[in-house]
Amino acid sequence: MEARTDEIADGIYRLSIFVPEIGPPAGFTFNQFLILGDEPLLFHTGLRRMFPQVREALARITPPERLRWITFGHYEADECGAMNEWLAVAPQAEAAHGHTGCLVSLNDMADRTPRILGDGETIDLGGGRRVRWLDTPHIPHGWDAGVLLEEASGTLLCGDLFTQLGDGPALTGGDVVGPAIAAEDMFLSSSLHPSMGPTIRRLAGLAPRTLGLMHGPSFAGDGAAALHALADDYDRRVRAALG
C-alpha cells in the first residue's frame, strides 16, 4: 500500500490509500485529511496497519510531531484505528470528538484524555483557519457521527457520506451522488431513519465549496446541491423501508 497526497483546497491535503481487494473489481479508497495552520489537524487516522504509509505521506507535507488535533467522523477502525499511534508521535496532539463519541469510546480508548466538542463548537487552528464540529448522529451510521467544516475554504469533511467505489481522481467536479447511490445499493451501510434528509439538508445550508469524502474523490463545486440530492435519495430509501 502506498499513500498519495493531493492538495484539494488551500492548505488542505488528501492522503489516500487505494485497496483493490475491497469491493472488487473497482476497489476502495481510504482517505485522511490534513489541515495546515499554526495547530495542524488530521481528520481520520486511517487503519492501524496503514499508519506507516499515512505517516510517511503526512511527513512529506509537515513533520508529524507538529500535529495538534486528531479527529474523525465516528468511532470505527478505518476512521480512528491509528489514533493512539498518532498521539504517540505527536506529543502535543489531542483527540477531539463529539460528546457521545468521547463518553462511549474515546474516554477509555484514547491514550490521552480527549477534548469534547459540542455541536457547532469551533477550534481555531491559527493562520486564519477555524474548524467547526457538527453532530450528525446515525448519519450515515454511528450514533456518535459528526462532520467537520473548515470555514475559510468552505471545505466539509463529510466522513462516510457520499461513499463510493473505485480509485478516481483526488478532486472532481463531476457527479458524486450517482456513485454514492450505487455504493449504498451494494453495501447497505447507512442507518435509515426519518431524520436523515433534514440533517443532510442542514449541512447543505453551509453551502460548502469542497466536499472531502473518506471513500472516493473529493468534490469541488456546488456542495449544497450535492447534499440536497443525497438527502432526496435517503428520503426515498426511508419511504421504501417504511412501506
Image (tube, rainbow, N blue to C red):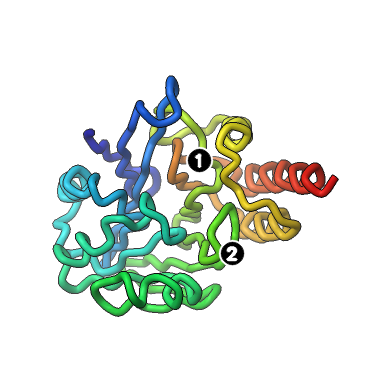
Residue linked to disc 1:
220
Q: In the rendering, at what x and y percent does residue 139 appear?
A: 59, 56
Say what secondary structure mark 1 lies in.
Answer: strand
Q: Residues within 10 Å of mark 2 (few under 14, many from 20)?
A: some
Which tag is nearer the camera, tag 1 or tag 2? 2
On the rendered image, what quadrant is the C terminus found in? top right
Q: In the rendering, at what x and y percent does residue 53 appear?
A: 19, 43
Q: In the rendering, at what x and y percent does residue 164 appear?
A: 51, 35
* Placement of 88 over or under 226, stated as above or below: below
Residue linked to disc 2:
137
* Placement of 5 over or under 116, stated as above or below: above
Q: CA distance from mark 1 to mark 2?
A: 25 Å
Tell me which amino acid carries mark 1. Ala
Query: Taking 165 as reference, is 39 left or right?
Result: left
Q: Earlier in the sequence, mark 1 or mark 2?
A: 2
Q: Quadrant of residue 226?
A: top right
Residue at 34 percent across and 44 percent down: it is 14
Outermost residue toward the top in this view:
25
Tell me which amino acid carries mark 2. Pro
Q: In the rendering, at what x and y percent does residue 238 appear?
A: 76, 48
Query: Taking 77 as reference, is 235 left or right?
Result: right
Residue at 31 percent across and 55 percent down: it is 81
Please name whichever residue, 3 or 102, is drawn nearer the observer in this view of the structure: 102
Outermost residue toward the right in this view:
243
Residue at 14 percent across and 63 percent down: it is 89
Q: Which mark is residue 44?
A: none
Residue at 44 percent across and 36 percent down: it is 217
Query: Taking 106 as reference, is 179 left or right?
Result: right
Say what secondary structure mark 2 lies in.
Answer: loop
Q: Residues within 10 Å of mark 1 (few under 14, many from 20)?
A: some
On the rendered image, what quadrant is the N terminus found in? top left
